[in-house]
Amino acid sequence: MMRSLYSGVAGLKTHQTKMDVIGNNIANVNTTAYKAQNITFNELMYQTTKRASGASAETGVGGTNANQIGLGVKVGAINTNIATQGAMQTTNLPFDIAITGDAFFVVNNGLENYFTRAGSFYIDGAGNLAMTSTGYNVMGWQPDTDNPNNIRKDTVTALRLMTEANLTYPPEATTMATVSGIVDQNDNDINARNGKVMNLEFYDNLGYRYTARFAVHLEDADSGRYYTRLVDILDANGVSIGEDRLTGVSFGMQNLEVMSNLTYPLRASGTGDTTDYSISVSTRAVAPATPISISGTVDGAITGTPTQAEIEALYGLDAWAAVNVTPAPNLSINSSGSLVVGTSPNTTTFSHLSNVDANIVDVTVSRSGLPAVTLPVGSAAKPQANVAAVNNFVLVTPATDPVSYTVAGATPPVTLDVNQIRALYGDIPMDDVTEFIIDSRGALVATMRELNDVVRLEYDPSSGSFVRAGDDPDGNVVMSFEGTLNTNFSDISINFTSTLMSNNNGRATIGASAGGTGENRGLGAGRRIGEMIEIIVQDDGRIYANYDNGQSRLLGQIATATFPNPSGLEKKGDNLYSATMNSGEFDGIGEDIKVGGGYMTSGVLEMSNVDLSSEFTEMITTQRGFQANSRIITVSDSLLEELTNLKR
């Protein structure tokens, strides 16, 4: 038989194989992470009919080449184009992960490890990260038990993400807090008796939320002194935790005497808790002053120039504003004692105020059956010695009437009991007042108070910068919890160094928030228990869980494998490869994808790297090659037919 007949057959077979490869490539044009294959041909073998000979010097005959007849073609190699990256397809699914680089995911079927570039994963019923197509577990590394924020790179294991421990994040008690913002001496709240409210939300170690309510007060603006005190602690429903539990809470100093400027105006006569009190005041004639000229008669003869205080005492604040202009207006006192500013017909009239609002010399309070008590204006009154707290008031021992204050320097000594204070000023709180005065308008001004759970804040009067909180220049004050009723709380270190004394247009912005500051920013804030709300995969393969309490936890890291010769991997179907002797072995540990310069992208998948234009071109050349080889068989058959026809 003719050798060409078998060469044609060999050619048909190899081109059929090439067509099989092309067909497989085209069939997998949309297969996730499929790597295209290509085929190369080798000569099959040769039959040597004459060997080559060399030149002979003796005969002078030159050498001849060998005569060899080829016997066809065979498949040389089928290579996988594994190094070419496929395009990326966006899916927006969190566990669809594409690798950029030369690495492979490691998956396991329970018996052995396989390798894949197809990153279509999901969480199975056991909480494991697995392949959607085969259910094989995705392999990786677990967090270090000694340091949960680090990964311990050891032999790869299945990544079980949805464990009972991972579904929630444990609560934690607050241990640190920061106070920041501006204190402004002109803020109305910071000057009021109740002070400017400052709330601090914090947690106990069971995750229950509480609110510590503080009050911030101005003490002395000239020396840059303010103070803040703990007023109450409320639960999540806004209800106080109760006196029994508050007794075990301490904040700052106990029994700290602070300066105060709380003012309570004088009440009208005959009002108050009892009606058997009468109030009288005595006023003085306004002394002459300059430079405003005035004449007339009010509370006695006055001529000359009253001062601002005198104008305001007699005619009110608006009167001084009308008088104190440039150029100075004409002033006069009419027959009714009213102040007339300006020249007719453009005049403004200010009525003379009542005696109570006039410039007061002293205040006298009388009660049926008791001597009248007169308080000189501006005298400091303090509780008598040998006193005790009863019903939030100071009780003199032995009780005589039953509460009294002594006015220092008065001759004879002047005493005022709490009932008299109530009659004069209403039912005002006097339990923490240690000194008060009566001002020139007859108002009671609490000048000193003795407080508990209070911290004095000091600022540099020239720059407004923070100086100290209590005795600590570092600005740390501890709110501590003691007693069996407060065992679920942790002590909270509150830092005040971020506060500042400054003009802020009468608006203090001081406020508190849980968590440390500086290098400890955000630490110790505490938290409630958290439920898992999402899982994210970073570009280095680290997997984190986020919780609805703002926390996150490292769940593990996806391991990858690289090979010296990735084309030597053996295809196992289902987008899987296995290691061979020619690809290089997997060490069982793998490597971080970042080591090789690669990275992972969540929400996308790698597509097939099949190039259809190349495949169709190869299909044409394969078809023509197959046709040519079939012609070899046809022609060889014709020759054999002619040979057999030699014998008729």
Image: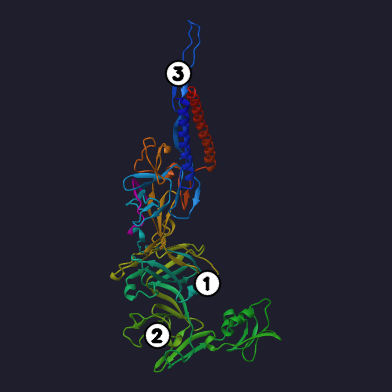
Q: Which residue is mark 2?
A: 418
Secondary structure beneath label 1: loop
User: Furthest-top residue in view?
Assistant: 58
Which residue is more in the foreground, 107 or 152? Answer: 107
Are the two marked residues, 1 and 2, in contact with CB atoms closer than 8 angstroms? no
Q: Nearer the viewer, mark 3 or mark 1?
A: 3
Q: Which residue is mark 3?
A: 49
Name the amino acid, label 2.
Val
Are the two marked residues, 2 and 3, in contact with CB atoms closer than 8 angstroms? no
User: N-terminal of the two: label 3 or label 1?
Assistant: 3
Taking the magenta stretch, the answer to whether it contains residue 500 is no
Cα distance in 3D space between marks 3 and 1: 117 Å
Which residue is more in the foreground, 316 or 245? Answer: 245
Q: Which residue is mark 1?
A: 186
Name the amino acid, label 1.
Asn
The magenta stretch is: 150-164
